Amino acid sequence: MTSTPLAPRRWRQWLAELAKVLGDWPWYDTIRTLRLRLRDDHLALTAGSLTFTTLISLVPLVTVVLAVFTAFPMFSRFQLSLQQYFVQALVPDNIARPVLQALTQFAGKASKLGSLGLLLLGVTALALLLTIDRTLNNIWRVPRPRPLAQRLLVYWAALTLGPLLLGASLSMTSYALSASRGLVSALPGGLALLIDLLEFTLLASGMAALFRFMPHTQVRWRHAWAGAVFVALGIELAKRALGWYVQSVPTYSVVYGAFATLPIFLLWIYLSWLIVLLGAVVAAYAPSLAMRVVRRPDRPGGRFALAVAVLQALALARVASHRGLSAEGLAGQLRTDPLQVEPVLDDLLALGWCGRLDEDGAQRHVLLIDLQGTPARPLVDRLLLQDKDSTAAFRQRSGLDTLTVADLLPGAGPAVHQGP
């Protein structure tokens, strides 16, 4: 009796699970979510803003990267490999080469600036990362970003270590990359496919890291990878489509002549950012899509009503064996988008009404207050109705200031009313 090797068996199990997930995935809801977020979050306008910021930040970014390679002469070969990668990543090839050549010339001139000039270039490069950070936090509905000092430290690490790590990876296959683009003798079909797969994996890995670490919230790796694969596939398709269009319909070349490089390059940057933002939407809404939950409409008082529902669920969980619920568990129980539940949990954490426990990489939220003895006024002030002179009469006549948290919960029984 022969036994199946362990590694092939795991691969078959993984592929079977992947096929099941893809078969059960709500593709229609995904397309609908992308369409709604594209419209409601003004992602097309945001992509245009990022395109402008990218254009003015390209020279500072290239200058910083070249400065890093200059500081480490042993990485000079990495610089060539990195340039080759970006030449083939841009489309079409006759557009990519002039752009890269111009950027290198501009960066070489910028490197001759004094210390103050280089500092200003570094600030311009960081401005792009700050814009990306703010955009992704908006997509994930993060109310407060990281502290500025912490963000600047992360961005500077990305600007310095990122090019070195990417260059080191690419230098191992620099000959193969050149051969796959016809710069040397042709590669066998299998090896060329392997190189294309390596490029795809590098792009997807970078996007997964961006979606995992940039938003100031917990993003699971599988959700980050879902958005990253979407981005990698989208950019590959856009690259081929734009390359075909430029070759088949030479409108830009006829109208703009030698200046045609700029509009095509701007169009490519815009398409790339639009695909990245849609990939971020996929990563952000993957939990709600997988659970097939709905997003509550943003109506006045809706966040207060959701907070009351969360308090009810946490109160019931407190008397159960698990003593708490995760954000995804709450979202599944309330049939609500996790991106709407997490800000409400942050509000309850700020009030000190619930606590967040980290256990084996997972987070569990527990209720900390006595429902009968805790006034509901702080929650009312924060999410429903501010305490002002114009609302004082209504608050007094409605009795809002005399309510306890237990009075807010619908049909709360004795078990729910128990204290901690």
Image: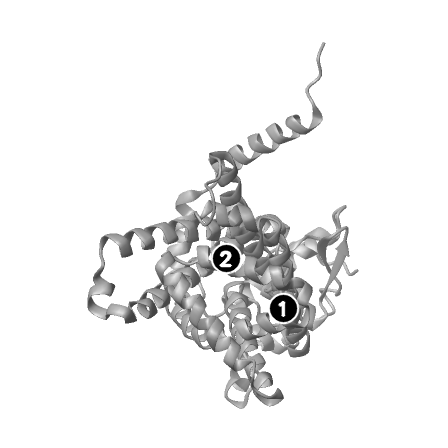
Q: Amino acid at mark 2?
A: Gln
List x then y, in percent, for residue 141. 53, 66
* Rendered residue at 55%/87% (across/down): 388
Q: Which residue is mark 1?
A: 69
Is tag 1's residue or tag 2's residue first in the polypeptide sequence?
Answer: 1
Residue at 24 percent across and 64 percent down: it is: 253
**Of the pair 395 and 50, the residue shown nearer to us:** 50
| Real-space CA distance between mark 1 and mark 2, rounded to the nearest whole angstrom | 15 Å
Of the pair 296 and 79, the residue shown nearer to us: 79
Q: Which residue is mark 2?
A: 84
Q: Using the image, determine if residue 289 lies above or below residue 11.
A: below
Q: Residues within 10 Å of mark 2 (few under 14, many from 20)?
A: some
Q: Residue 143, can we see it?
A: no
Q: Is residue 136 among what the camera can see?
A: yes
Image location of residue 390, percent across then percent down? 50, 88
Q: Is residue 163 above or below residue 7?
A: below
Return the x and y of residue 346 as percentages of the image width and height: 64, 67
Residue placed at 56% from the left, 84% from the top?
A: 112
